């Protein structure tokens, strides 16, 4: 009787351990599948992202992948979630290190985050392009979150238009590099990002805006125009 009780306890323990381990194994499998998908997109292009390809790359059975994700659209959603989680964490850490007296904290954080997106071994930007091609509706939440960041940037900036210009310049650098269209070297891009992040490089809104050089030169050459 004691032996049966002991065996029952062991069986219960094994069942409980299996129950507790399943979520952990499922999370590991999900993470491995996402990394495999990022590798495929980066190496072979979005068009080559299939369950068969993910299975070969990750070593997870196709049946296991289908159970985890059901559809390719869900794989793309998982890639977007991975990207969002990583860069939200990066942004929080960067923002926490900014001096409270520093102007434009949200702008600086977003420029730095954009710069960070260019350093990834498996560029998550490819996952975004893949999602856009497959299902543009997947980007709705991304656009909504970005709209909130833009609103904060404008609220914090003394010159909202200049702040947005800096942000879009950073995004342009990142996107052109992602698409292979940027003729600049890595060092040149790094220097440009340094300038975008350096508040001292940007004219204070309290200063009167200067006329373009060509206009000033024209006025100097024609003094009578200045009295018109």
Image (cartoon, helix red, strand yellow):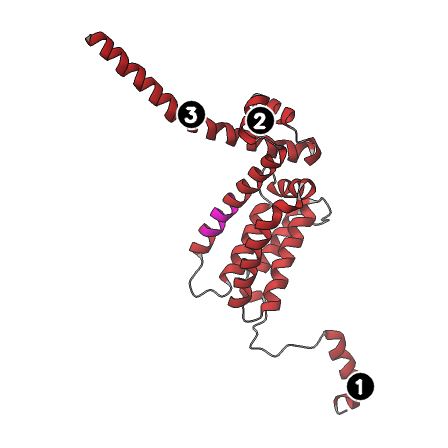
Query: Which circle marks residue 222 in the picture?
Result: 1
What residue range appears in magenta?
86-92
Q: For mark 2, what is the residue?
A: 66
Q: Main secondary structure of the magenta part?
A: helix
Asked if residue 65 lies in the magenta stretch, the reply is: no
Sequence-earlier tag: 3 or 1:
3
Say left or right for 150 vs 132: left
Q: Which of the two discs, 2 and 1, sits closer to the camera? A: 2
Q: Quadrant of the C terminus?
A: bottom right
Q: Nearer the viewer, residue 223 or 75?
A: 75
Say left or right for 98 vs 160: left
Q: For mark 3, what is the residue?
A: 22
* Number of numbered discs visible in the structure rendering: 3
Q: Residue at x 61, y 67 (%)?
A: 162
Rendered image quadrant of residue 47: top right
Q: Residue at x 63, y 27 (%)?
A: 51
Could you say where residue 76 lies in the image, as x and y percent from the top left?
60, 38
Q: Pointers 3 and 1 in contact (CB under 8 A)?
A: no
Could you say where residue 216 lies in the image, as x and y percent from the top left?
73, 79
Q: CA distance from mark 3 to mark 1?
A: 81 Å
Q: Secondary structure at mark 1?
A: loop
Q: Which of the two discs, 3 and 1, sits closer to the camera? A: 3
Q: Residue at x 75, y 88 (%)?
A: 226
Rendered image quadrant of residue 60: top right
In the rendered image, the residue lying farthest to the left is 2
Instruction: In the rendered view, tell whether residue 34 sits above or below residue 173.
Output: above
Query: Which circle marks residue 37 in the picture?
Result: none
Q: Quadrant of the N terminus?
A: top left
Kindly tell me whether residue 30 is visible in this rendering: yes
Could you say where residue 18 lies in the image, as x and y percent from the top left?
38, 21
Q: Pointers 3 and 2 in contact (CB under 8 A)?
A: no
Instruction: In the rendered view, tell whether residue 191 sits above or below residue 3.
Output: below
């Amino acid at each position: 009787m004691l032996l049966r009780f002991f065996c029952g306890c062991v069986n219960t323990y094994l069942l409980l351990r299996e129950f507790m381990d399943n979520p952990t194994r499922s999370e590991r499998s999900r993470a491995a599948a996402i990394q495999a998908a990022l590798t495929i997109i980066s190496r072979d292009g979005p068009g080559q992202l299939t369950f068969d390809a993910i299975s070969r790359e990750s070593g997870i059975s196709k049946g296991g992948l289908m159970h985890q994700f059901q559809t390719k659209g869900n794989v793309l959603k998982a890639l977007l979630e991975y990207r969002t989680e990583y860069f939200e964490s990066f942004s929080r850490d960067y923002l926490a290190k900014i001096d409270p007296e520093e102007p434009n904290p949200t702008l600086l954080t977003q420029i730095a985050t954009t710069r960070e997106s260019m350093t990834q071994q498996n560029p998550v930007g490819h996952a975004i392009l893949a999602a856009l091609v497959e299902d543009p509706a997947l980007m709705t939440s991304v656009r909504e979150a970005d709209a909130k960041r833009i609103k904060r940037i404008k609220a914090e900036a003394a010159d909202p238009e200049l702040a947005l210009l800096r942000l879009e310049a950073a995004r342009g650098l990142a996107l052109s590099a992602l698409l292979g269209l940027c003729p600049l070297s890595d060092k040149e891009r790094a220097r440009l990002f340094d300038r975008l992040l350096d508040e001292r490089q940007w004219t204070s809104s309290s200063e009167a805006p200067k006329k373009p050089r060509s206009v000033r030169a024209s006025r100097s050459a024609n003094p009578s125009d200045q009295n018109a």
